[in-house]
Image: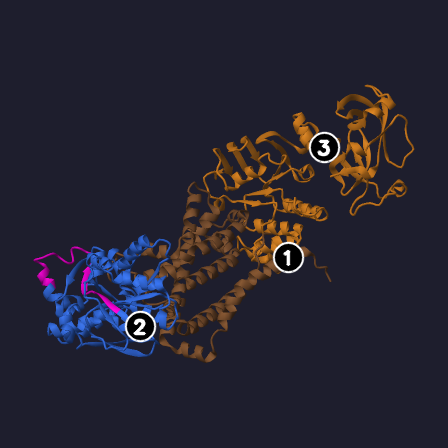
Chain colours: A orange, B brown, C blue
């Protein structure tokens, strides 16, 4: 368990200030923040590569603030895996510890058997991070820090690597703190979420809470997650209707599903059943005064609740069971003669709903 | 075939001139004496002693440089402290000092050491002079090498529970092998070729450069040339040998 | 014009140049100092162009081919010099040294330097003086003791380099010309005339000792006998009228007055033509 108390460090141009942060044992805490918010500096403080001006860091109850990095039982994964080029994969993983049983476990858990004797130069970005993770697990850290670890992995491999991390998290419940600016990763991996802006921890809580009720306009803009809903997925694969209604090719691993919330049900493509999140980007939503005949599976009638002018675009808040945000041009606004209370139809494809 | 542009031609021509200026004198010298004369010269005990002394002292100077220069290079690469610029400057001073001036400076320092202890006129003086003029080359190369290893790599090692000493020997040093070797070659080559400071501090016993100059100024070209030829062949051969050692190391790139 | 000369003449050459330039502005004068044997070899072996050559042993002129007309113009004597005032006391404690210098130095108790006999006459003059000391003080084996105690590290190609070693306190003593000692404010001990190679009157005594030194080519040696230390100067470039003027200047009484001021020994100027035997 990680506890941070009254941590302060002057970073030009602002001061990093964390009055209190607690991460429970085995929990993954994701710290979201824009670039330059102080995320990496924060991790450097925790890991012991720099000293805070004030404050304490406690790992499982012991104060490590004065300890050098090698004595804190805190391991860190960077954006670049920083594998040692003069050692091969197996030697890298075994660098910090000599435990052969654990070695075998870690290798198996991460699926790295076939890579053991390879040179690190031939690995892909995703493989490198897995090796880095294995290397860190070998020393049995009490706390695992991750600094935007998926950033330098190409998009295709990213999913697999994130999945591997989740697998590890399920098997070995390491207390983890990950920083990223990518909210999707935040959604997929976090038990608790925090937002860091200009050195201050401006919001913490369960992921869905933070996303649906950002504490300030600034946070909302950063998170930029419009139309994010929590619910659960049910597969539709054996239902007759699905065969007819998925004209577009499905991405690997995804199947037609229903996303059920308290107030609405959406047609989506999901990769798992059970609880999760659905996100529809405003640009994917078409508005129509009349119901439309379209192949899109999702059509909802709704009421315009608010009209907000944002420069050249107009943001509409529409209640269709779920609260949607949509953008239109002022021209369309005039053409459709929309005012507060207008009835309108929202249309979007199942395939344009992002699911997590 | 790629068309030859005027730009390429100019580049090649200028580069060619540069190479020729360096290469032609070396080649002239390498083939400036007959094998018979060279063999006779090699048998001359004064020559053998001088060559042996030169390479031996160069080697000792190099060992000293490795021992004390590596830590300094590491500190300069990794630490940040107020006096850092100043220390950096000190390291570079020997490079800009004219060699006889260095010799005089060293003479003043060691003049009052009692007999038996004094490096003046003994191989220890040669080592000190060689060290003085060449260690900067090594430190600069080693420092650049340490700096090229991203500090996050050493941090990673620390966060895996490996202390600073072990991290130095297991990560920083091995990853810097190539630069250390290059720096060592440069330092050694510079030591072997030094003349101006050594001739003031230690005239006898004579290192190769002093011997050649002494023979030249007293007896002329015919007496000094064969020694010069031998020395240049030895240097070239040893130099190439060290370079092949260097390229066989694995290249260092951060991953 | 280029003047090759013995290192011990440097102060004289510099001062003479200075005065010559005052009378003849625009003349370019260059001097090259070295051991006298090296100066001769520069001409014979290296074919170095020069206008005048001045050496610390007049007999070296015989090595030039053809042997030019030369003038013996200056004398000197050998002394034991030091920069460490406490080592060589003034009178009357001086006497201890006068009596016993040869034993004290050859015992190796002090560090002492000489110049290289193969390159600089001051070097072989020192050896010859040691041999003369053995005879004069009647101490058989003294010369060998000098040879045994001498440390090669204190050998320098020119006597002027020994001065640097003395001044930096690296060296206790050096066998140098008296002029060098005076010019550098060194304390020195004079030897009896039987040893110091100073007096014409002891010419025969001096000639009783000899030494082998390297000749033109390494490997070949030539015998050098004892002689009073006499410098010679010659014109090596007969075609240059300026060289003649410069030579005349060196032999003039104006420069002659400098000799004693600078610590040399004034001797009657003697002109030697090549075929004549040396006096």
Give the left or right position of residue A173, taking residue A284 as reference: left
Q: Nearer the viewer, mark 1 or mark 3?
A: 1
Give the left or right position of residue C148, taking residue A356 as reference: left
- Image quarter hosting the N terminus of chain A: top right
Determine if marks 2 and 3 fall on one subunit: no
Give the left or right position of residue A159, taking residue C222 as reference: right
Residue B242 sits above or below residue B48 on the image: above
Q: CA distance from mark 1 to mark 2?
A: 56 Å
Q: Residue furthest top?
A: A340
Q: CA distance from mark 1 to mark 3?
A: 58 Å
Q: Secondary structure at mark 1?
A: helix
Is residue B204 magenta-colored? no
> For mark 1, does the 10 Å Cα neighbourhood hold few (<14), some (14 to 19), or many (20 or more) residues?
few
| Residue linked to disc 3 | A225
Is residue C93 magenta-colored? yes
| Residue linked to disc 1 | B10
Q: Residue A301 shows which numbered tag? A: none
Of residues B142 and C100, the one drawn nearer to the viewer in this rendering: C100
- Image quarter hosting the C terminus of chain A: top right
Q: Secondary structure at mark 3?
A: loop
Q: Give how far across and how far down residue B75 sits, in percent.
A: 45, 48
Per the rendered image, the range of residues in magenta is C71-97
Give the left or right position of residue A58, taking residue A148 as reference: left
């Amino acid at each position: 368990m990680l506890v941070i108390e009254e941590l302060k460090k002057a970073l030009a141009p602002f001061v990093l200030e964390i009055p209190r942060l607690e991460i429970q044992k085995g929990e993954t805490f994701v710290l979201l923040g824009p670039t330059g918010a102080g995320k990496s500096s924060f991790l450097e403080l925790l890991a012991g590569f720099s000293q805070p001006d004030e404050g304490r860091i406690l790992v499982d109850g012991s104060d490590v603030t004065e300890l050098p990095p090698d004595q804190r039982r805190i391991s860190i994964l960077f954006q670049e895996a920083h594998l040692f080029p003069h050692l091969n994969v197996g030697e890298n993983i075994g660098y910090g510890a000599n435990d052969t049983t654990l070695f075998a476990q870690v290798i198996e858990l991460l699926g790295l058997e076939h890579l053991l004797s390879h040179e690190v130069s031939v690995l892909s970005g995703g493989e490198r991070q897995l090796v880095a993770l294995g290397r860190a697990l070998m020393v049995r850290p009490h706390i695992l820090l991750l600094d935007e670890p998926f950033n330098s992995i190409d998009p295709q491999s990213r999913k697999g690597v994130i999945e591997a991390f989740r697998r590890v998290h399920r098997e070995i419940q390491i207390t983890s703190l990950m920083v990223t600016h990518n909210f999707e990763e935040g959604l997929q991996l976090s038990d608790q979420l925090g937002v860091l802006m200009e050195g201050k921890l401006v919001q913490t809580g369960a992921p869905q809470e933070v996303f649906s009720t950002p504490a300030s306009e600034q946070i909302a803009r950063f998170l930029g997650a419009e139309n994010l809903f929590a619910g659960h997925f049910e597969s539709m694969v054996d239902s007759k209707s699905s065969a007819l209604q998925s004209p577009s090719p499905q991405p690997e691993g995804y199947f037609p599903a229903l996303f059920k919330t308290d107030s609405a049900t959406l047609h989506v493509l999901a990769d798992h059943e059970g609880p999760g999140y659905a996100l529809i980007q405003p640009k994917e939503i078409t508005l129509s005064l009349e119901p439309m005949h379209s192949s899109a599976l999702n059509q909802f009638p709704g009421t315009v609740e608010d009209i907000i002018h944002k420069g050249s675009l107009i943001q509409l808040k529409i209640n269709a069971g779920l609260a949607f945000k949509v953008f239109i041009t002022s021209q369309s606004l005039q053409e459709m003669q929309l005012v507060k209370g207008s009835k309108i139809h929202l249309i979007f494809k199942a395939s344009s709903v992002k699911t997590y | 075939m790629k068309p030859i542009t005027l730009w390429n031609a100019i580049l090649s021509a200028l580069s060619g001139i540069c190479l020729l200026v360096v290469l032609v004198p070396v080649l002239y010298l390498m083939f400036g004496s007959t094998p018979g004369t060279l063999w006779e010269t090699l048998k001359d005990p004064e020559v053998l002693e001088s060559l042996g002394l030169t390479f031996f002292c160069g080697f000792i100077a190099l060992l000293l440089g490795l021992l004390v220069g590596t830590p300094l290079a590491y500190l300069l690469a990794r630490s940040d402290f107020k006096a850092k610029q100043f220390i950096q400057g000190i390291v570079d001073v020997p490079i800009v000092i004219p060699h006889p001036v260095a010799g005089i400076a060293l003479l003043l320092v060691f003049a009052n050491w009692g007999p038996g202890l004094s490096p003046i006129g003994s191989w220890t003086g040669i080592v000190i002079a060689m060290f003085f003029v060449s260690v900067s080359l090594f430190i600069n190369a080693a420092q650049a090498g340490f700096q090229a290893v991203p500090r996050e790599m050493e941090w990673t090692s620390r966060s895996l529970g490996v202390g600073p000493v072990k991290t130095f020997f297991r990560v920083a040093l091995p990853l810097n092998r190539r630069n250390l070797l290059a720096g060592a070659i440069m330092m050694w080559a510079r030591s072997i070729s030094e003349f101006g400071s050594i001739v003031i501090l230690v005239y006898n016993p004579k290192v190769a450069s002093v011997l050649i100059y002494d023979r030249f100024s007293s007896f002329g070209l015919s007496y000094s040339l064969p020694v010069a030829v031998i020395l240049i062949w030895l240097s070239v051969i040893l130099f190439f040998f060290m370079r092949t050692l260097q390229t066989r190391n694995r290249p260092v790139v951060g991953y | 014009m280029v003047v090759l000369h013995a290192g011990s003449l440097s102060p004289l050459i510099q001062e003479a140049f200075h005065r010559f330039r005052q009378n003849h502005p625009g003349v370019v004068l260059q001097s090259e100092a070295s051991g006298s044997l090296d100066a001769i070899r520069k001409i014979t072996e290296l074919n170095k162009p020069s206008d005048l050559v001045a050496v610390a042993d007049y007999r070296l002129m015989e090595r030039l081919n053809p042997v030019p007309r030369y003038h013996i113009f200056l004398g000197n004597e050998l002394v034991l010099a030091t920069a460490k005032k406490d080592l060589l006391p003034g009178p009357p404690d001086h006497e201890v040294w006068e009596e016993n210098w040869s034993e004290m130095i050859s015992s190796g108790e002090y560090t002492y330097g000489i110049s290289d006999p193969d390159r600089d006459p001051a070097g072989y003059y020192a050896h010859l003086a040691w041999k003369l000391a053995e005879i004069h003080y009647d101490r058989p084996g003294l010369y060998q003791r000098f040879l045994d105690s001498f440390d090669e590290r204190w050998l320098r190609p020119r006597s002027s380099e020994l001065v640097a070693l003395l001044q930096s306190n690296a060296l206790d003593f050096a066998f140098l010309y008296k002029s060098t000692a005076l010019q550098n404010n060194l304390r020195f001990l004079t030897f009896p005339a039987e040893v110091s190679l100073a007096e014409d009157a002891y010419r025969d005594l001096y000639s009783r000792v000899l030494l082998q030194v390297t000749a033109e080519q390494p490997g070949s040696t030539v015998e050098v006998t004892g002689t009073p230390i006499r410098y010679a100067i010659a014109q090596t470039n007969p075609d240059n009228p300026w060289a003649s003027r410069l030579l005349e200047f060196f032999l003039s009484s104006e420069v002659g007055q400098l000799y004693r001021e600078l610590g040399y020994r004034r001797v009657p100027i003697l002109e030697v033509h090549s075929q004549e035997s040396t006096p």
